[in-house]
Every structure is written in structure tokens, then in C-alpha cells.
Amino acid sequence: MTDKTPRLTTTGGAPVPSNNTTQTAGERGPALLQDYQLIEKLAHQNRERIPERVVHAKGWGAFGTFTVTNDITHLSRAKVFDTVGKKTEILSRFSTVAGELGAADAERDVRGFSVKFYTEEGNWDLVGNNTPIFFVRDGYKFPDFIRTQKRHPKTNLRSPEAMFDFWSAHPESVHQVTILMSDRGIPVNPMHMHGYGSHTFSVWNKDGVRHWVKFHWRSQQPIKNYTNAEAENLIGKTRESYQEDLYNAIDEGNFPKWKLCIQAMPEEDALKVPYNPFDLTKVWPHADYPLIEVGEMELNRNPENYFVFVENAAYSPSNIVPGIGFSPDKMLQARVFAYADAHRYRLGTHYEALPANAAKNAPVNHYHKDGSMRFFTNDFGNPDAYYEPNQWNGPTADPEVKEPPLKISGDADRYVQEDKDADYVQPRALFNLLPQDEKERLFSNFGAAMGPCSDGVKERWLAVLKRVHPDYEAGVRKALQTDSDVNAISVTDDTEVTAK
Ligand code: NDP
């Protein structure tokens, strides 16, 4: 020990005499229970893990800056957008959906794309994916869907049979499954993919005028993806390619950037467009609602501690700020509850007070009280002000930040089903815009993914594809008749990393 070396202490701060030798009864006797430091050290190791996320367990994240580049104050009163040039600190987290905490990064899967904005009116979480849509449009379906992506209860293996059985019973999933099986199903790393808020949200301005909005993160790095064979080859060498790529890029000063854009739909258009604008399985065509630039995000700081700032980061669509709101999107409404609840379970009652989640630029004044990890004081300088309303000038609600009233219309059927024919229109538009070489890879990716499925499930899914486009069904049927392994490898013979 030198003068400069800090003294090792107990968790209570008392200096520790030894970190090597268990106290024993006599020179060769058994250990003493009074060696509290030994017990404390072992007990802490036993408690180093928290439950991993049920979905989006494996993730990569970084801090950065969001800068406003275009004035949208006519659309939103959110302070984060109020001045061109304004900068707000953000914390991002990207993830795969199905794989566990130790899963390989470069697997075919949807990617989570979450950004926490530490705004001056509280934290705004934009918790989306690298796809503009999702597999299902109703929160009722989410637990069943995720079950099919996880391990079979008996074999403990992933089950293509379950995945395609579920998808073929939910034809609205064909839009997202098409993206998943396309080139964009395996981005080379988070920097080379777009992000989307996916849901329809709302914004309102200072006059109380509401627009429905979709959020888009447009990568300023070229879109780059791996083929199945390239990914398999990479995973054979490293399972941590995303962490390596993102961490090293930032460490070397190559800061990745995304433009934030919105599509904005006047409130009354919601009843006029030929698709349900609140259906998470549908996009809004760009021709109808062009992208409006809002700002730019740059990731420029690796967190000092992965667990503290990435594993503990708790994103929830329930975190909105005045000027940004929800919509009748059923999946969004389910997520507003489910995400915050997942964090209460995974991190604890007061997860919002953890360093990754605590508001940095806004005062936090609430009357929630005790519970595990209550390490904040909210007595507002007066211990008598612990309920509301009170005579002690404790915090009160501000009606000025109320969102404008929502006009409700329609019949009284609370279980209304969507028009199933509409489910095939947008996947068809996507299929039609793919160049022939990407279509061929799409077919072969289905061949590899569906190879293990039963004939019954294959035929049911092929029937769904036929309703999208006869060429789609024919291409996948042909790929299924080829040996799926040979098929997957042959794609790479003439395919390098795909850049568009
Ligand atoms: P556009 O031609 O204006 O846009 C097509 C969009 O598709 C672009 O954003 C393009 O991204 C993206 N794209 C290209 N290849 C893929 C792929 N393999 N997986 C996912 N996205 C891809 O057409 P529309 O707006 O009229 O939409 C047509 C179809 O494009 C939709 O039905 C939908 O399937 C898909 N799409 C639409 C989006 C939207 O918000 N309107 C967003 C993403 C996809 P890029 O610009 O990088 O080439």
C-alpha cells in the first residue's frame, strides 16, 4: 500500500485488514462466521445478476447529442424541439429481440432502437425498432408471439414450426416477416440501419392543434447487411460484433449519426386514409406523408460502465413530454403499461431514479414514497409536504400541459377486427420495390428459415405469400424444394456485404 492507494473498505466504509485470508479458528482450524468480509464478498457475487429482459435482452448503447436542425414548432410545443440548434443529451440502446443476454449479435432478427432524450421537461423515450412496422397490431397477441420466438418448453430449442404456425394464423405479420427475411434482417451493426418509432404518436402545438406522427431515424451511414452465410461465418469468429463495432467506432472518434424525421398527418385525416393509421402493421406511404427533417443524433460517448448505463437503462413509451403524445394504436397502448411494468419487476420500484434513467435536465417532483432502492429525497425542503394537496407549497399539477381533447367516433363494437384484405397491400408494395437479386435472397432466406417446418405449416404460410404476390409464393416454394443449407450458402457466392 502506498500513500496514493485508497484503503479497501467494507460497504459501510470501514478499512479492511485483509482481502486474501479467511479468518480461522487457530492456524489450521475451520473458518469463523465472524469473517463478515468473506461472507459479504461471496454474497455480493451471488447477487450480481438481475433478470434479463424477456425481450430485447442483448443490447448495445451509447450516449450522444440530439441537435434540432429544422423548426417544427408549428407542429409540436415540445421544448426539445423549440429552437433550431438546440442540443439535448441522449442515451441510446440497440438490441436484438429474441436472443438471450449471451446470444450472438449478428443473428437474423428485428433490432430494438431506443433513445432517451433528457429534455428540460422530463425524459422522452422513443422506443422503437429498425423496422417501421411490427408483426401484430394488438397487445393481446404480444405474449403469444414472443412465446413463439423463444425456446420450446420441452426441447428448450427455438422452434421454426411455432414461428410459422403463429405467423400463418396472423397474415398481418407478412409485412414484418418480409422485412425480417429480406436483406435488412441482419444489419452489419446498429450504425448501418435506420430506426423507427414504429407506432403512430401524436404531437400538438401551443394552440392545441394535434397531428398524428411517425418518427424515423435515417442512418447517415450507408445501409449495410449481412447475408446468412456471412453472418454465420462472422458468428463463428465473434458473438459480440455489434458491441465491438459500436464501441470501437465511438472510441476512435468515428461518431455515427442519424437524422430524425417525422411524417405528420392532420388529425382529421385519420378517418380519410384507406388504411388504419393506428395499425402497427402498416406504414404511411412517403408519397402521402413525406419525411420532414427535425434534427440529428450523434453518438459520441461510450458509457463508463455497461451495467449502470446500458443494462440498467429502462426505456418506456410511457415517457412522453408535453407536446408529444400517444395515439389509439392498440400496441402502443399495451406497451405504455407493459414496458414500465417490466422495469418495475426487473430493476425495482424506483428504477427511474437509477443513473441511466434519472432526469438530468428537469426537476423530478412526485409524491411516490418508499420501496426498494428509495435513495432519493422528495420532501421538497419541507417534511410536512408528503401528501397532495397540502398547505406547504408542495408540487401541484399544471393544467397548462394538458393535451388537447381527443375526438372519439365510431360504433360501439369494442372488439372490431381489421379488414384482412388490407394486410396484403403494403407487403405487396414492398415486394414490388425489391430488386430481383434481393428477391432471390428473400426466397432463399425463407428456404433456410422454414426448412425444419412441417408440410402443413409450410403450405399455410405459402398461401399467405400467394395473397401478397404469386411470384412471392412461387419463389419461396422453389427455395423450399432445394436443400435449405446448400441454398443458404450458395447466396454468398455472388453477394458481398449489401450496401444500398
Ligand atoms: P417508398 O419507395 O417511398 O419507400 C420505400 C421504403 O422502403 C424506403 O424507406 C426504403 O428505405 C425502404 N426499404 C427498401 N428495402 C427495404 C427492405 N428490404 N426492408 C425494409 N424497408 C426497405 O415507398 P412507400 O413509402 O410507398 O412504401 C412502400 C413500401 O416500402 C411499404 O409498403 C413498406 O413495406 C416499405 N417501407 C415504407 C416505409 C414508410 O415509412 N413509408 C419505411 C420503410 C419501408 P431506404 O430509403 O433506406 O432505401
Image: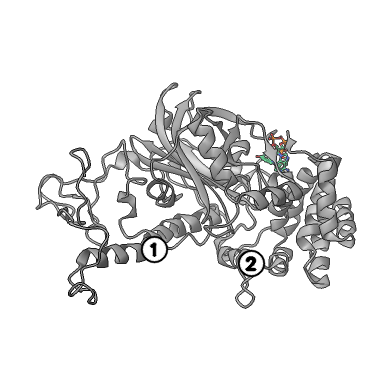
Residue type pointed to by label 2: Thr
Query: As displayed, is residue 255 above or below residue 303?
Result: above
Q: Nearer the viewer, residue 485 or 330?
A: 485
Q: Dot 1: what SS?
A: helix
**Residue at the spot 51% in from the left edge and 50% down from the top edge:** 59
Assign the C terminus to one quadrant of the image.
top right
Q: Is residue 110 left or right of residue 165?
A: left
Q: Dot 2: what SS?
A: helix
Q: Percent x, y for residue 53?
A: 48, 59
Cα distance between the residues tagged 2 and 1: 23 Å
Q: Mark 1 or mark 2, which is nearer the start of the sequence?
A: 2
Report the residue marked by disc 1: 345
Q: Percent x, y for residue 136?
A: 63, 58
Query: As displayed, is residue 40 above or below residue 106?
Result: below
What is the crowding at mark 1: few (fewer than 14 residues within 10 Å), some, or many (at least 20)? few
Q: Percent x, y for residue 369?
A: 22, 58
**Disc number for residue 148:** 2
Q: Quadrant of residue 477?
A: bottom right
Q: Nearer the viewer, residue 80 or 494?
A: 494
Work out whether residue 212 can be spotted: no
Q: Is residue 430 left or right of residue 65?
A: right
**Residue at the spot 23% in from the left edge and 74% down from the top edge:** 28
Q: Is residue 381 left or right of residue 95?
A: left
Work out whether residue 174 can be spotted: yes
